[in-house]
């Protein structure tokens, strides 16, 4: 079993008495791409800053390869950070920026030059060494920020919404590029974002956070297909959330119909939430469907149509390549595998 | 092009009180009135190069330089402390720095005279504590003290403005890259605050080199600076020609130092308060 590179043990953080993180426990494996995902104010950036050493936790411990580093200042940690707004030094050129960490460590000039140029090649900015920071575009500054952190050969790289300021196309390119860099160098990446698609694209592990609490930890597929609660389901992609009743193992009642499903281990008659992804509902001829309904609206979304079908006072959102006209009657089918039963979350 | 006329009052003002006097000074510095009209001469500039006057010039620059240095050494840490304070405290302390400036400049300087007197407050307290008395009134030290006291806010405020605006994530980034706090200061904070330091130096050095009030009150008149010398030429001796030549030299001196500063500033682009 691979050893954990970072352990967060019972981490809590409060600012002026207001809790931002509530008893966070997280284990980060070597060489993994881990994403902290959540809406703004969920505590993901605070978690990152605690790992980086810019904030002290109010309670708890951070272990680095098993050693307590809770009170170690940032400059003594083998962790580097790519900041949200890049934080490049405006009074230095590209070379000096990237070389900063090595210069501070008093490495000889020839080695620094070699390493910096190699790093610039890695981020596809060869020949930019003498440029000033202000003459670079957002995407280029981003790459320099990544190069500046990576040149120090950190064991862990922290990235705080690094792609937030870039346009969509560039963001997609950078996502792939970052993933490539991570795989090539074999460094642990801890990535903070509020963009669920970004998280699904890049991560090995996703940590969904809300209200200072970890909601779910898992691989992208698991998080998407088996959300643990309504928050995760809502946050990761679009979904239909319907309340229902568990009749027995593998049998659930919702929307006035009994569906076979694959979930077990609930109490008989327990009230539960059911998550169904919009692409998992099939529209069929009215008489063939488990549910019958009327098409309320159809919106063209490019690859698919987003269709709203009303059935038994429930509005189902359906993503389908088929186009059913508004007001037509349709049948809806849901396969057992696509029904995700979750415990009801007691109201906060 | 619209509303051009609103600038006219200012234009008239500038011509009357800046351009015309400048030309008059230039005029008097090279033209001498004789029985048969005006005569062009370098005589007054030559007079400025006499050792006794060069010495005055040197003293002025030297004292101004010293007080600028003291202001910088005192002001920079103050500005850093101010910029690191919590927002609520910050405004209060900035106000503390500004309040003395609301008082009349002469009053403040006179106050120092009474404080520093042989039987003044400071010496009374020192005597009470059985400490040796402090007799610096009418010395260089007193003049420097007066300059530092009066001009310190002009050093603190521009530096504070730059430090306060500085992106704190730059400091974190440097820390993150392995720089300890001293290195962060040396490589990041100080270089980025140079625009503030430069405008602070300009704002302190210029009034310090031209002052004649501080040197007369705290220097006791026995210490002549270039400001006093010029004042004397116009008000006492009545030698307007020589006074004008001295003024021109002082102006050139200031223009030179400003151009050196501004060239340096362009290399290190950055926001300035003033």
Image: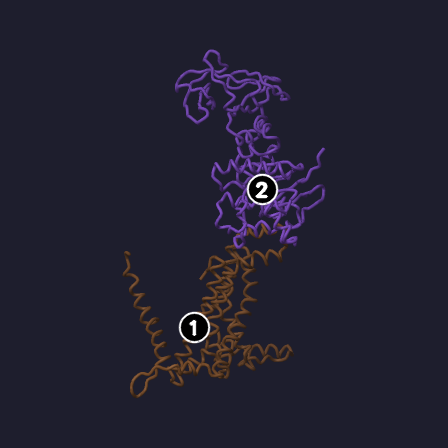
Chain colours: A purple, B brown
Say if A216 sits above or below B143 in the image: above
Subunit under mark 1: B
Q: Secondary structure at mark 2?
A: helix
Q: CA distance from mark 2 to mark 1?
A: 54 Å
Determine if residue A55 is in view: no
Residue A263, percent from left and from top? 61, 21
Position of A109 compared to A195: left or right? right
> Which quadrant holds the N terminus of chain A?
top right
Position of B84 compared to B226: left or right? right
Q: Residue at x 56, y 82 (%)?
A: B118
Q: Quadrant of residue B9?
A: bottom left
Q: Which residue is mark 1?
A: B252
Q: Which residue is mark 2?
A: A122
Looking at the picture, tell me which residue is in the foreground, A297 or B243.
B243
Say if A255 sits above or below B123 in the image: above
Q: Does mark 1 fall on the same chain as mark 2?
A: no
């Amino acid at each position: 079993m691979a050893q954990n590179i970072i352990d967060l043990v019972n981490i809590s953080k409060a600012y002026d008495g207001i809790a931002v993180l509530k008893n966070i426990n997280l284990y980060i494996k070597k060489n993994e791409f881990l994403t902290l995902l959540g809406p703004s104010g969920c505590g993901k950036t605070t978690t990152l800053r605690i790992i980086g050493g810019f904030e002290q936790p109010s309670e708890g411990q951070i272990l680095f390869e098993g050693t307590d580093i809770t009170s170690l200042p940032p400059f003594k940690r083998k962790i580097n950070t790519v900041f949200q707004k890049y934080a490049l030094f405006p009074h230095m050129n590209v070379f000096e920026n990237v070389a900063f960490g090595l210069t501070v460590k008093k490495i000889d000039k020839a080695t620094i030059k070699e390493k910096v140029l190699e790093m610039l090649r890695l981020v596809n900015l060869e020949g930019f060494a003498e440029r000033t920071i202000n003459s670079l575009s957002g995407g280029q500054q981003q790459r320099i920020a990544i190069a500046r952190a990576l040149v120090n050969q950190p064991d862990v790289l922290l990235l705080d919404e690094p792609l937030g300021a870039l346009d969509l196309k560039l963001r997609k390119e950078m996502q792939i590029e970052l993933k490539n860099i991570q795989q090539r160098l074999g460094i642990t990446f801890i990535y903070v974002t509020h963009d669920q698609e970004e998280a699904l694209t890049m991560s090995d592990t996703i940590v969904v956070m809300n209200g200072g609490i970890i909601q779910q930890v898992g691989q992208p597929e698991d998080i998407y297909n088996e959300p643990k609660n309504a928050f995760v389901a809502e946050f990761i992609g679009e979904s239909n959330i319907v309340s229902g009743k568990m009749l027995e193992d593998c049998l659930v009642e919702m929307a006035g119909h009994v569906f076979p499903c694959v979930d077990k281990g609930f109490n008989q008659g327990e009230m539960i939430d059911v998550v169904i992804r919009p692409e998992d509902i099939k529209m069929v001829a009215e008489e063939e469907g488990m549910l019958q309904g009327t098409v309320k609206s159809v919106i063209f979304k490019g690859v698919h149509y987003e269709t709203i079908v009303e059935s038994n006072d429930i509005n189902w959102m359906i993503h389908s390549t088929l186009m059913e006209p508004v007001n037509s009657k349709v049948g809806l089918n849901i396969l057992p595998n696509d029904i995700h039963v979750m415990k009801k979350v007691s109201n906060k | 092009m619209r509303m051009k006329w609103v600038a006219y009052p200012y234009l008239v003002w500038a011509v009357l009180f800046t351009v015309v006097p400048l030309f008059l000074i230039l005029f008097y510095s090279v033209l001498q009135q004789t029985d048969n009209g005006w005569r062009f001469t370098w005589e007054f500039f030559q007079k400025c190069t006499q050792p006794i006057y060069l010495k005055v010039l040197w003293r002025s620059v030297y004292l101004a330089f010293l007080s600028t240095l003291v202001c910088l050494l005192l002001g920079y840490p103050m500005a850093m402390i101010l910029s690191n304070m919590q927002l609520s405290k910050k405004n209060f302390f900035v106000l503390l720095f500004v309040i003395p400036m609301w008082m009349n400049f002469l009053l403040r300087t006179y106050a120092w005279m009474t404080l520093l007197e042989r039987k003044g407050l400071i010496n009374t307290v020192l005597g009470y504590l059985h400490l040796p008395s402090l007799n610096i009134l009418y010395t260089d030290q007193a003049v420097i003290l007066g300059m530092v006291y009066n001009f310190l806010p002009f050093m603190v405020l521009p530096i504070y403005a730059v430090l306060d605006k500085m992106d704190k994530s730059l400091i974190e980034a440097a820390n993150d890259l392995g720089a300890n706090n001293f290195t962060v200061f040396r490589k990041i904070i100080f270089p980025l605050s140079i625009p503030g330091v430069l405008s602070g130096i300009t704002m302190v050095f210029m009034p310090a080199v031209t002052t004649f009030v501080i040197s007369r009150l705290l220097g006791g008149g026995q210490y002549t600076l270039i400001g006093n010398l010029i004042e004397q030429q116009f008000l006492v001796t009545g030698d307007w020609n020589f006074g004008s030549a001295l003024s021109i030299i002082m102006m050139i001196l200031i223009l030179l130092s400003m151009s050196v500063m501004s060239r340096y500033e362009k290399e290190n682009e950055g926001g300035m308060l003033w």
